[in-house]
Amino acid sequence: MKRVYVGPKEITIENTYFFDYSITLFGNTSSKNISYTINTLDNVLEFEYWNPDSNNREIKIYNELLKTIKEPFEIMAHDYKIVSQCKIPKNATLICKNSDELIKLFNNKIETKKVLKGLVPMLNYTYVKGKDFDYKKLAKDGKTLVVQHPLGSGGSKTFLCNNDNYKELQKSLIKDDTYIISEYMEDNIPYNIHAVIGEKNYEIFPPSMQDLDINEKIEYIGSIYDIELSKEIKNKFEEYTNKICHKLKELGYRGVLGIDYIYTNNELYFIEINPRFQGSTRQLDKILIDNKLPSLFEYNYLAFEGNELPSTKKLKNSINKKGEIKMHQKYKTFKKYFDKDKLKIEELEYLITQKCNLNCVGYCSEGGPGKCSMTQEMIDASMKPFKEINILKILGGEPSLELDLVKRIHDNIIKNRIKVNEVWFFTNCVDRERVEKMIEIFAKPTKYINAVYVYVSRGKYHDRSMRLLHKDPKVAEDNLKYFKKKYKGKLFVEKQWDEERPLNVGHARKKNNNPIKLTKDTRNIIMFGDNKIYKLVFSPQGYERPFFCNPEEVERLSFGHIINDGMETILVNGLRFNEMTEEIIEED
C-alpha cells in the first residue's frame, strides 16, 4: 500500500524515501507531490497556516486534495490535530495516530503543564481570563509579560505585553478564554528537542537552538543544530526529557513529539510539548540519514508498530563536539590574511530584510514577507574581513525598505577601502521614491566600486500580488522605464522576468564595464566551482547560509552566526567543510 505524507511543506520530507506521495500546501507538484499553491495559482495561500484560527481552511484544502488519489494509501500526518479532522477517503487509512484525548491534551498548554507539574522545572506563571487581564496588577515594576493562549502554535498566539502596548493587547484578548501569564526573561536561549516514544523504548534526539522573531509576538523562524552545549545543560536536557518521555509513555502516547525549553538563570525550563513533527524535522532528518539511521518518519512508524526503536546513542556522543576552533597548520595562510583584513571573495550576498511591500506567499524564494531585518552591527562584522569582492548582491524582501542598511553597506566599502567589481540590487520597483533613494546611495562614482546593476523583478506573480493589494502593476513598469532613462550611461538597469521564479538571480544578465583588476597579493580563500563553496549569504537572523553549485544543497547548512560566532569561525567552518581545505587554501 502506498504511503502519503500530509502536511504544510513538501520540503519537510525531502531527505527521506519513506513516502510514495505527498499532499502539501507548498510544493513543486511533481509526479509525487500534490501542492495546493501550485495547482491553483489563482488561490495563492493567503493565511497563516500555523495559526489555529486557520485550521478549518487548511482542513478544507486537504479534503479536496485527498480526493485526487484513487489507489489505496496510508496517511502519515505532520499534525494529527488537523488531519484527523479531515474527511478520510474510503481508500485511505490514517496511521500512526494517538487517541483524540491525548492529541487534545498535549495541544493544550495549560493541561500539559498540569500533567507535568512538579516533574520538571517551569517558570512561574499564572492563569487569567481574557476579561480579567490587568497588566498593571500582573507586571512587577512594569516588566514585560508573556501572554500565551493555550491553543497557539508557531508563536501565533504568544504575545509580549509591556507598558506601551498593554491597552491594545487587552482589547484583543478573548474574554472567556484562559491565558498563561509569565514574566518575559530577557536573557534566555530557546531550545527544541525531538523525541519518539515506542512500545518498548523511547529515543531522544539532539537538541536545536530556536531562531525566534521577538516583536509584539514571539514567532518561530527556524532552528540551528550546530550548537555547543555545556555538560551541565546536556545533563539537564537528558534528565528532564527522560522524565517527560517516561510520563507520556505511561499515559499511552506514542510516536514523535517536540519539547520546547528555555535556558535562563542557570536553569533549563520546560515551556511546552508539540505532539507532532516540528519545523526543524527536515534538518534533523538529514543528520539521521548522514549517520546511517532511519529517518524520523520511519522512527515514528516503528513506534506504532511496537518495534524497538534504533539507538541514537552515537548521535548523542558525536553531536556538539566542535568546541573551540584550533588553528591547524593548514590554516596559517588563512589566519595571516584574516588578521590583516585582506580576504578576497567571489560573491557576497546580503538578504538585508524579510520585509516586503508585496505579498507573494507560495512562490517567493524567501517564502513570502516577514518581519526580520539585519542589524548595522551584522553588516559591519560581516564586511570587515574582506578587501576585495567580485560581486556584492543586496536583496530581500524589498531592500529599499531598509535604506539605513543599504547606506551602511556603502559606508563600509568606503571606510574599509574594499574594492568591489559589481554591486547588484534586486527590487520590485513598486515604490519609486524609496527605490530612487536606494539607488542614489550607490550612484555617486567612487574609485572603490566599478559598476552598479539594478535588477527589477517583474512577472505574473508580482502583478497578481499588486492587484491583491489594490495596486496597478503598470506602476512598477513605469518606474522601470523612469530609472532606465534617468540612469542611462551611469548605471545598468535591467528587467528580470522569469514566469516561474522571478527572484532567481541566476537569470540576471551580467555586463562588465572595465572591471577593476583584482590585485594578486590576496588569496581566493572562498572559492567557487563544482561542489565548492560558491558564495556567502547573510540572513536577517544573523546566520551565514552557504550556497553550493548543487542546488539540492542550498540552505541546508550554516557556518555560524555573524555576531555570536564571529566571522573567523564562519570562514574556518567553511574551509573545513567536506575536507576541501587542500583545494581552497594556497600555501606560501
Image: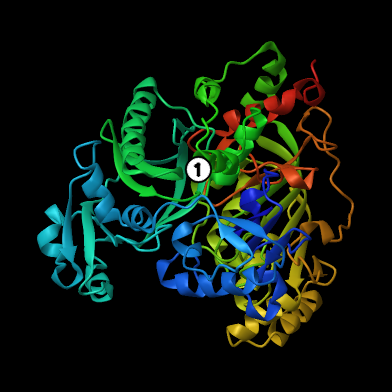
**Does any portion of residue 357 appear in the rendered image?**
no
User: Is 167 drawn above or below residue 539 in the view shown?
Assistant: below
Q: Quadrant of residue 462?
A: bottom right
- Looking at the image, residue 543 sits to the left or right of residue 391; the answer is left
Horizontal and vertical percent position of residue 75: 59, 57
| 521 vs 576, nearest the viewer | 576
Horizontal and vertical percent position of residue 482: 75, 80
What residue occupies the far left of the structure in this picture?
137
Residue occupying image coordinates x 34% and y 62%: 151
What residue occupies the far top of the structure in this picture?
329
Callout 1: SS: helix
Neighbourhood count class around disc 1 (C-alpha, 10 Å): few under 14, some 14–19, many 20 upward? some
Q: Quadrant of the C terminus?
A: top right
- Looking at the image, residue 20 sits to the left or right of residue 125; the answer is right
Q: Which residue is mark 1?
A: 304
Residue occupying image coordinates x 73% and y 53%: 446
Horizontal and vertical percent position of residue 431: 62, 77
Horizontal and vertical percent position of residue 127: 17, 58
Q: Quadrant of residue 581?
A: top right
Residue occupying image coordinates x 50% and y 45%: 377
- Looking at the image, residue 513 sits to the left or right of residue 577; the answer is right
Residue type at numbered disc 1: Phe
**Does any portion of residue 11 appear in the rendered image?**
yes
